[in-house]
Structures are given as structure tokens and as C-alpha cells.
Image (cartoon, coloured by chain):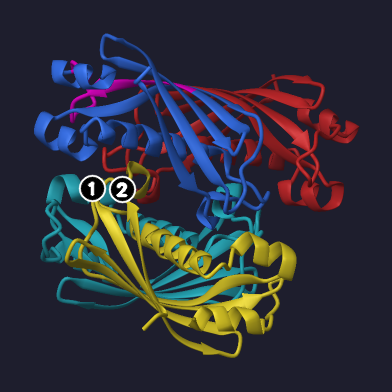
Chain colours: A cyan, B yellow, C blue, D red
Amino acid sequence: MNNANQQTYRVYYEDTDAGGVVYYANYLKFAERARTDWLREKELILSELAEKENLLFVVKKVQMEFHKPARLDDIITVKTTLDKISGTRLYLTQTLCHNETTLVTIQVSVAAVDNNIKPARLPKHLVNKLWK
Amino acid sequence: MNNANQQTYRVYYEDTDAGGVVYYANYLKFAERARTDWLREKELILSELAEKENLLFVVKKVQMEFHKPARLDDIITVKTTLDKISGTRLYLTQTLCHNETTLVTIQVSVAAVDNNIKPARLPKHLVNKLWK
Amino acid sequence: MNNANQQTYRVYYEDTDAGGVVYYANYLKFAERARTDWLREKELILSELAEKENLLFVVKKVQMEFHKPARLDDIITVKTTLDKISGTRLYLTQTLCHNETTLVTIQVSVAAVDNNIKPARLPKHLVNKLWK
Amino acid sequence: MNNANQQTYRVYYEDTDAGGVVYYANYLKFAERARTDWLREKELILSELAEKENLLFVVKKVQMEFHKPARLDDIITVKTTLDKISGTRLYLTQTLCHNETTLVTIQVSVAAVDNNIKPARLPKHLVNKLWK
């Protein structure tokens, strides 16, 4: 399936906490970087969508399960799969791994909004690119 | 019920993003501050539990729903309710509000672990304080 | 002198890193919270200045010296002193302490800009309030 | 000179604030990523130094000048130059650029410490690698 995607990111000190592992909220940063870079590969650039099409994405729901912690210097691989587009929402599954170990699984739904954070239609060209 | 608790925090620039609202992962920071301050009111101090009892809490599951965004200078009220203790896990519901508006609802389960991030028993004195 | 000010903030897990202490960049977050709350006490609210007067503050220079680290659960006291106003810039000294221990000293200069990040005049009412 | 080094990082939503630009403290995150990756290229891995040699680096002084802001989706190039090693300290100059524009210049000194945050000697093999 071509609607799956994989990105990698390094864990730096900024991502960790005094427990010696990545701070729990920071996995959502890696997840968003991966969604952003997945869109970029489809030539959908967030800053251009905001400026030229008055289109932003906001997260509506997140379900996260934490299996194993990541640590300083680890490489985190984020696998992003687009499960469904329905109305103005995208539904995605994201899996964060280190080597063969699954760290965190995330289900996320994202809604298109305009600059006033009001619901916006997903333009046709965007939907087409998302499924390509 | 006395196992509910309320804390308030201010939104600063550090919490916001270029969309003009609080960055989605940062609501989990407010949620954790509220859990920490709820424990503190029960005389359970995270740094003391780590040092003296070799006990840490790690988040195992999060479900978040984003209703309305918070903005710079808003006061966020976090209501934290302990729903259940089962084995080594706490189950909590947290609601983040600004004035009368619900911003984010969070279901979170938290597990007790030792310094090696291995599951740990919840000491009796701790469970007693949690329900008081 | 009444242009000095003191604020306190708690250290949470989000502020720390795997070294067991507050992450070095995060002291600048505490410093900015203190500048924001100092302005608030003078009835200068950042979000209102941005909306009503098209006025933002951006940091131009920072000098930081790190003396001792802060740790989880510490209370950080931030003392902020306005040293000088010159043209569109404020010059401030900020000292972060834990109990009697000085943690970090910061010299910071901040410039007034408009919404396009172009230099802006400091309105008279604002300068008057700053020195009060 | 071979003690200069260049790294690039993307700006994501997490790095920005409601002013529409990168939050001022976050430039220090990019600077630290660049120092970490510069060390990595010299086969000095922070987590290994901590575990095997009980050696950490802590920042002692920072001087930052902010020239132009970075924005969402910008690529930030960080040039890191080792200026001097003296006693247990490294002195570095770091320049953050976007295309041909200098965004931020940073002078930073970093000290070697042990796991108890006490000053530590810089091992010979480390000094040799740093100058190579």
C-alpha cells in the first residue's frame, strides 16, 4: 500500500526527562514531525497550505499506548498509515519503533480548519495526493 | 467525592505554536502538572518517592479529545479524578477547561515502576493516601 | 526600587532531562514566564498588547550563566529587574534561585516589534507603567 | 580547519510560538542537537560517555544574539566551531542560518562533569578526537 510512510528521528537530551527516558508528551512531537514529513513527500507543505489555501490541520483525537521507553541517542522510526478520510477528517495510525521494538502506538484523527480554527473542506487536490 | 481535585495553570508563549493556540502535545504537560500537584496535596512527592521508595510512575495509555483550543494568557483549570486502582495501575480522568469551556478531556492510566522501569507494587500507604 | 519583581514556579518532569536536572534551555522558559507575570502585575497583558496595539516583544540578546542545577519538585524564584529602557528596547536582569542558592543569572534585552516583526515604538503609557 | 562542522534541522510546529516564529529558547535545542551530532561524527556518543566513562557535559555560559526569526518549515543550518579547550571546558561558537540569512549567533561554554554534576577531567582520547 502506498499510503504508508516511514520517517526516522534521533532522541536528544531535550526529549528526555529525569526518569532517564523520553518524556511521554514528546512522543507526540515525533508523531507530528512524521505526519508533516509524510505530507511533504506528497508536496503538501504545511506553511504553504496555511498561507495560500488558508488551511490548517488540528488534532481532534489521540489514543496512545506506551509499550517501551526510548532513551537518549536512540533512533525512533515512525510508521504512519492513512486509514481513512471522512468529511474533513483524516484518520491515521502511527507506530514508533526503536530497532525491532515497538515503543508507542498512536491512533490520531486530524481535522482541516481555516485560519479562524473553523472546520474547512479538504480540497480535492489534497485528497488525491493523500491517497497517491 | 474527595478523590477529585482541581489545579490552575497559565498559558505562556512557550505553550503555543504558530497556529496561535496551545500546541497539542502541551496539554499533556498541564495534565501531568495537575497529577503531580494532586499527589503533592496528598503528601506524595514524586522526587521523594523516586529517592526513598525507588518508585516512579509511567504513563501507559492516553485517550485525548480536543474540543476547543486554549490561547496565550488563558488560565487552564485541570480537574483530575481518580477512577480506579487496579494492580499497579491508576486510572484517571482529567478535564482541562478555560472558564466554562471544556478544552480537552483525557483518560490516562499510569503504572508504578522501579528505577529500572520494571513494574512495582503500589505501597499500602500510597494507596491509602490516594483514596483519602 | 519598585521596578524589581519576584515570581515563583515549580519544576515538573517536563522541565528536566536525562541528566536528572532542568534542561538548560528551559531556564529561559521560567525567565519568560517571570517577565510575562511582571508585565501582568503592571496591567500589561501580552495577548492584549498584540491584539489591541499590534505590539509584540522579541528577545534580541541573552547572556546566561549557569551556577547550580535545579531538580524535580524544586521551587524556582525568578527575580526580574528592569535596568534600562533605550529606544525600543528593554534591558533586564533576571536571577533564578532555589532557596538561598543562585541557579542561573540572565541578562536579556527585549525589543518591541509589530505583528510583522518590524521595530515598533514603545507607547508612552507602557513606558510609564514599566517604571512604576 | 577541521574543527568546524555543519548540521541541518527542520522547523516543525513544536518549535514555533503564537508570534508565528521559532520560540526563543528553542534555538538552544537546535544548538544542542548540532553539538551532539558534531560529537557523534567524532565517535563521541553522549549516552556512551555517560554510561562507560561517567562523563556528562553541562552548559556553563551562553551568549545569544537574535538577528532574524526562523519560521515553520524552514531548514536551519547550524555551524559549530570549537574555539578553545581550557581545563574542563569547551568553548564553541555556533551560527544558525536559514539559506544565506544569519538567524542567531551563540557563544557557549560547556564543562565536563561526572554523574553527580561534579567537575570531571576531559579524558585524553576525547580531547584528541575533538581537535581531529
Q: CA distance from mark 2 to mark 1?
A: 6 Å
| D112 lies left or right of C69 | right
Q: Residue at x 63, y 36 (%)?
A: D35
The answer to which image quadrant residue B105 occupies is: bottom left
Residue B17: mark in rendering: 2
> Is residue C117 one of those drawn in magenta?
yes
Q: Which residue is mark 1?
A: B20
Above or below for D21 versus C114: below
Q: Are marks 2 and 1 on the same chain?
A: yes
Comparing D80 with C64, the one in front is C64
Q: Residue at x 34, y 20 (%)?
A: C2
Comparing D20 with A129, the one in front is D20
- Position in image of residue A89 (x %, y %): 21, 72
- Position in image of residue D13 (x %, y %): 35, 49
The answer to which image quadrant residue A75 occupies is: bottom right
Q: Which amino acid is tagged 1?
A: Gly
| B96 lies left or right of D25 | left
Above or below for A55 versus C67: below
Say what secondary structure mark 2 lies in: loop
Identity of the residue furthest to the bottom in this view: B86
Q: Residue at x 16, y 71 (%)?
A: A88
Above or below for B126 versus C65: below
| C5 lies left or right of D5 | left
The magenta span reads C107-122
Q: Tell me whether circle 2 and circle 1 mark residues in contact (CB < 8 Å).
A: yes
Chain letter of the residue carrying label 2: B
Residue C124 visible here: yes
Q: Which amino acid is tagged 2?
A: Asp
Q: How dense is the environment of label 2, judged by Cα within 10 Å: few (below 14), some, or many (20 and up)?
A: many
